[in-house]
Amino acid sequence: MTALKEFFKQKPWLAFVPLVILAAVAGLIFWFGGAPQAAAESPGYQTVSVIRGDLSVEITGTGNLIAGQEVDLGFSTDGLIREIKVHLGDQVKAGQVLATLDEIDQLQIALDDWKLQLNAARKALDDLLNSGDKALAQALKKYAAAKETYEEAKKNLRQPGDARCAPAKTEEYYYNYLYAQDRVNEWEDYLQYGNTGYGVNYILKVLKPMRQERDAAYYNLKYCEGYTEQEILESNANLQLAEANLKKSEAIYQNLLANAGVDPAQVEIARARLKTAEIQVIKAQNDLDGATIVAPIDGTVVALNAEEGQTVVAINKIQDASSDATIYTSEFITISDLRTPYLDVKIDETDLQNFAVGCPAKISFDAIPGRTFSGKVAQVDPALVTAENVSMVHGLVELKDAEMMPGKPLPLGLTASVEITCSTVQDALLVPVSAWYQSSDGSSYVYVLGDSGMPEKRTVEIGLQGTSYVEIRKGLSEGDSVLISQVKSD
């Protein structure tokens, strides 16, 4: 009785069923009372049998044709546009030159110059790394010479009080000086007093060599007695300089000895020069490459926004050479691959579960009536989009054989309708949607006409849901009769 009440609750249009039941009971009584004709009065229900078959769910949407691949191209080097080799609508191949700048020759010269500097820097580094034995030998020779110079400076170091000559020699010079001075004094007395009988001229003549002899003896004495202050200072300075050179040459030698004859600092400098040259070669190569626009893909020129004679002032900036007007543009040549276009589609959000990558699609264009194209879903965006205040699922459908005729691709922007089939089951148990019910807890059930001729509620597991049929995974068997509506008795 509970199942029967639930059935009436779900199907209010069967409110008159109790009357039919009463009539059926009366008929049974009459039957058992010996009136078999009452069997014709038993109520009837409209039922269908559970069948096996295939079921698919199709969703629809709209979209516009876009290029499968599109690239925007422009110069990355400043200069004057020398030549544009393509026109709007031209078919191009990957690697084809599309446009060039007038500065290509100068850029090539700059690249060649930096390549020469790069080779020179590389050779200098190689030579330095391979010159260890020679450099070590030279350093050792300089170290030995510096050591010899230092020893000589030590030997020639002078201090205050140091005698230049042996004592006997100094004493000899001393007495020579005294003897010469005595003789000079004697003749100077003759000159002073003038009563010697010698004439003045004669005395002066004799005094001159005597004085010279005395002065020479004095210089010899002073020379042997010690060194001058200047000589002492110079000897100390020479020793300090020799000691510094010795330390420096020794450090150089020890450094080279520890590094196989190669100075790490010089290697670092050589490597830095090599690195600088490498960077400049790359920059020069990029500048040269940036003066030529090459098609990276096969495709069609769909945009061309510059002319020959314009000057590329900077990347993304083109100026008309004949005026002061400046045109800002990201790139001025656009290439699209029209051979494998996509349909930019939008699907109602309620169909989200039936919209997935890989699902087959049928496409029809408003401008091409009577023809259907095939494709498959290539992308489903993770976020919904809003179109006319309605939430939609956005995605891309890849088209196959998308040509209006051989060799003529479909034009971009065409409006299309798309029919997508994502969910399909085969050889499944199916019942009409009108036989399927859901409880408030989300469980599913149907009514099966039992042997007693009365509806019986049966819980089922639902699979794929179509517009007319629903898949039954558990709870029913093929051939079971399920109730879809009541049929009045004749």
Image (cartoon, grey):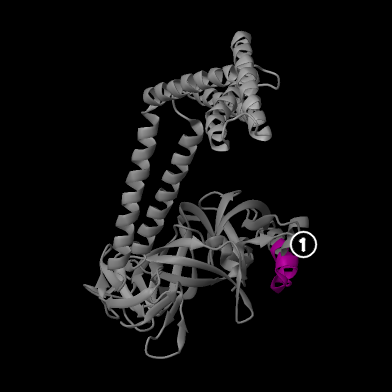
Residue shown at 53% from the left, 64% from the top = 466
Vertical relation: 308 (above or below) 275: below
Residue 32 part of the magenta-drawn span? no
Q: Is residue 258 visible?
A: no
Occupied quadrant, residue 30? bottom right
Q: Main secondary structure of the magenta part?
A: helix
Occupied quadrant, residue 410? bottom left
Left/right of residue 347 with respect to residue 106 in the rendered view:
right
Q: Residue furthest left?
A: 406
At which x and y percent is residue 44?
Answer: 61, 66
Between 272 and 157, the residue placed more toward the observer is 157
Residue shown at 59% from the left, 59% from the top = 482
Which residue carries the number 1 mark?
5
Q: Residue furthest top?
A: 168
Q: Amino acid at mark 1?
A: Lys
Quarter of the image that includes the N terminus: bottom right
For the record, the magenta segment spans 8-25
Residue 16 part of the magenta-drawn span? yes
Left/right of residue 295 with respect to residue 422 in the rendered view:
left
